[in-house]
């Protein structure tokens, strides 16, 4: 019988999704710090690992998978090799997760367990009977020995995904929990970090198996809330963290690698002893990434707009079309200008405001009094031609012309301050107001040109010739173009050479009466 200083952690049920199984038991506050046997754990169904009378070593040699062919914990006795296919698939999935996280992304492997049940990392297969997808067990300090326990078939209706697909994403999820214990003891000294452990592990599912969308069920639970749950929201337990696995995708898609290190590795290497959101902000604000948590969450809010029927081909989440649609607070733009709408964002709030358009077709929108920790992206969708645009909302006017009453405007808004609320105004004016020359947003920033070119949103006040230039940090011209443009909002794709070295660059927009400059970073 294996003995470990274990901590069993249970999730509250997902709001509105009580029928779903708990993704894992790795969350909340440790409740016990005594030596216990697995069969002595009182908070989960009783289990004695000695009932598992067979085991195999994974092909890469990293794991030993324990199983039985008899009793309630039995796996289906199928397989030409003499070993059940389910067991072989578990071993392959574990090796694959190890390759992605350790070999490819550079994370430290889990600690060995001093030869308990063999020298390899242990995976035990039991019948969770639809209660959990899996469980990671660990000790009372970091780094800690770990082992994991997964279900024997995933056939119960409480699993959003069944069979081998559920097996694979569960192992990917739980293996990241095992690795996390090399970096930080969960929830000490900060008890509120459980959500970050779950966000990270749910992201790992998508990283390893993008074709399996088990987490979509939990995204749907987040998206249907009238008040979108905060990243660190624990009002309903930590089940919302599974849905926030999309934020892990934002970090991967928008930041990826810098200086040979993946953003997720950098975050985990710096986590110990910090509150998770403080750590995220410090890492993202470092010279390696040149961003902030506010900017990352702003992109998260923006990406969440373009899902389901609102998805845009080859933009935002790779599986955006298959994701559910986020709930929005609906309003109607004013019939008579000028008009002002007050907006209040609670600490760390993300809000989605959808504006239908009345009979007129030309108007302007701007905001006022937004601080450095508040971000609102103005998005527009044209039903007739399927067009869409994105612009940062600020104290400058954004013009809309020739819009239809069938179209709509969405503002995904975020307050990145965890302590203080934010109040500002949305101001609506008629189209007779003069336009401004201003660069509004450049995204993604940092960018990897060989994968995707950055885009630029800018406004010009008068029609005429516009020159766009890109310079490196030495002032050398990298790219230029000269085009005649009409007045108003423009969205262009920059043409940064794919071979451009990593570093800081500047884009410059030159018109007859204005010079506008914005810096951005290139990664390799």
Image: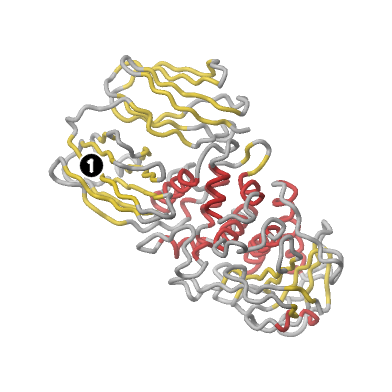
Tag 1, which secondary structure? Answer: strand
Locate residue 137 relative to residue 130 in the image: left or right: right
Q: Is residue 468 above or below residue 178?
A: above
**Which color scheme does this rendered protein use?**
secondary structure
Q: Give the percent coordinates (x, y) of residue 522.
A: 57, 31
Locate residue 191 relative to residue 378 in the image: left or right: right
Quarter where residue 371 is shown: top left
Give 341 or 18, whichever is nearer the viewer: 341
Locate residue 136 relative to residue 20 in the image: left or right: right
Q: Give the percent coordinates (x, y) of residue 6.
A: 71, 73
Pick the quarter of the image with the C terminus. top right
- Count residues near mark 1 (Cα–Cα under 10 Å), then give few for <14, some for 14-19, many for 20+: some
Residue at point 57% right, 17% down? 474
Pick the quarter of the image with the N terminus. bottom right
Locate residue 459 relative to residue 128 in the image: left or right: left
Q: Is residue 458 above or below residue 194?
A: above
Give 189 or 403, whichever is nearer the viewer: 189
Residue at point 56% right, 56% down? 275
Q: Is residue 1 above or below residue 422?
A: below
Q: Give the percent coordinates (x, y) of residue 483.
A: 38, 17
User: Seen from this angle, which residue lies furthest left?
Assistant: 336
Quarter where residue 167 is shown: bottom right
Q: Give the percent coordinates (x, y) of residue 81.
A: 83, 67
User: What residue would you read off at disc 1?
Assistant: 427
Quarter where residue 62 is shown: bottom right
Q: Is residue 232 above or below residue 47?
A: above
Give 69 or 33, whichever is nearer the viewer: 33
Numbered-mark total: 1
């Amino acid at each position: 019988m294996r003995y470990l200083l274990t901590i069993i952690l249970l999730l509250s049920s997902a709001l509105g999704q009580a029928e779903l199984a708990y993704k894992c038991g790795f969350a909340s506050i440790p409740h016990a710090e005594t030596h216990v046997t697995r069969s002595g754990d009182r908070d989960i169904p009783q289990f004695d690992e000695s009932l598992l009378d067979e085991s195999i070593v994974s092909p890469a040699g990293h794991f030993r998978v324990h199983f039985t062919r008899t009793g309630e914990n039995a796996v289906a006795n199928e397989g030409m090799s003499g070993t059940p296919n389910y067991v072989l698939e578990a071993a392959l999935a574990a090796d694959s997760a190890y390759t992605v996280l350790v070999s490819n992304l550079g994370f430290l492997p889990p600690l060995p367990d001093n030869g308990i049940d063999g020298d390899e990392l242990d995976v035990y297969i039991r019948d969770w009977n639809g209660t959990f997808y899996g469980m990671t067990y660990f000790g009372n300090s970091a780094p800690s020995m770990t082992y994991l326990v997964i279900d024997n078939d995933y056939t119960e209706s409480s699993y959003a995904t069944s069979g081998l697909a559920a097996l694979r994403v569960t192992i990917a999820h739980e293996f990241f929990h095992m690795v996390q214990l090399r970096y930080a003891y969960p929830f000490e000294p900060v008890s509120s970090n459980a959500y970050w452990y779950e966000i990270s592990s749910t992201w790992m599912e998508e990283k390893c198996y993008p074709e399996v969308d088990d987490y979509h069920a939990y995204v749907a639970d987040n998206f249907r809330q009238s008040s979108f749950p905060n990243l660190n929201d624990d009002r309903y337990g930590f089940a919302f963290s599974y849905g926030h696995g999309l934020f892990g995708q934002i970090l991967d898609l928008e930041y990826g690698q810098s200086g040979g290190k993946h953003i997720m590795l950098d975050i985990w290497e710096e986590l110990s002893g910090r509150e998770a959101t403080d750590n995220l902000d410090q890492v993202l604000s470092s010279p390696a990434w040149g961003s902030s948590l506010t900017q990352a969450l702003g992109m998260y809010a923006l990406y969440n707009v373009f899902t389901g029927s609102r998805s845009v081909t080859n933009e935002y989440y790779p599986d955006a079309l298959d994701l559910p649609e986020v709930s929005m607070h609906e309003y109607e733009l004013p019939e008579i200008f000028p008009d002002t709408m007050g907006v209040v964002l609670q600490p760390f709030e993300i809000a989605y405001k959808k504006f239908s358009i009345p009979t007129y077709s030309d108007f302007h929108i701007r905001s006022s009094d937004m601080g450095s920790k508040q971000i609102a992206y103005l998005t527009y969708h044209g039903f007739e031609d399927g067009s869409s645009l994105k612009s940062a909302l600020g104290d400058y006017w954004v013009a809309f012309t020739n819009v239809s009453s069938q179209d709509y405007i969405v503002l995904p808004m975020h307050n990145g301050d965890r302590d203080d609320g934010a109040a500002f105004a949305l101001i609506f004016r008629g189209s007779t107001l003069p336009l401004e020359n201003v660069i509004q947003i450049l995204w993604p920033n940092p960018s990897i040109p060989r994968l995707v070119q950055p885009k630029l949103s800018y406004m010009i006040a008068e029609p005429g010739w516009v020159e766009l230039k890109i310079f490196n940090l030495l002032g050398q011209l990298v790219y230029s173009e000269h085009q005649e443009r009409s007045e108003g909002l423009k969205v262009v794709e920059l043409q940064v050479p794919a071979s451009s070295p990593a570093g800081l660059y500047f884009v410059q927009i030159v018109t007859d009466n204005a010079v506008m400059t914005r810096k951005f970073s290139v990664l390799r």
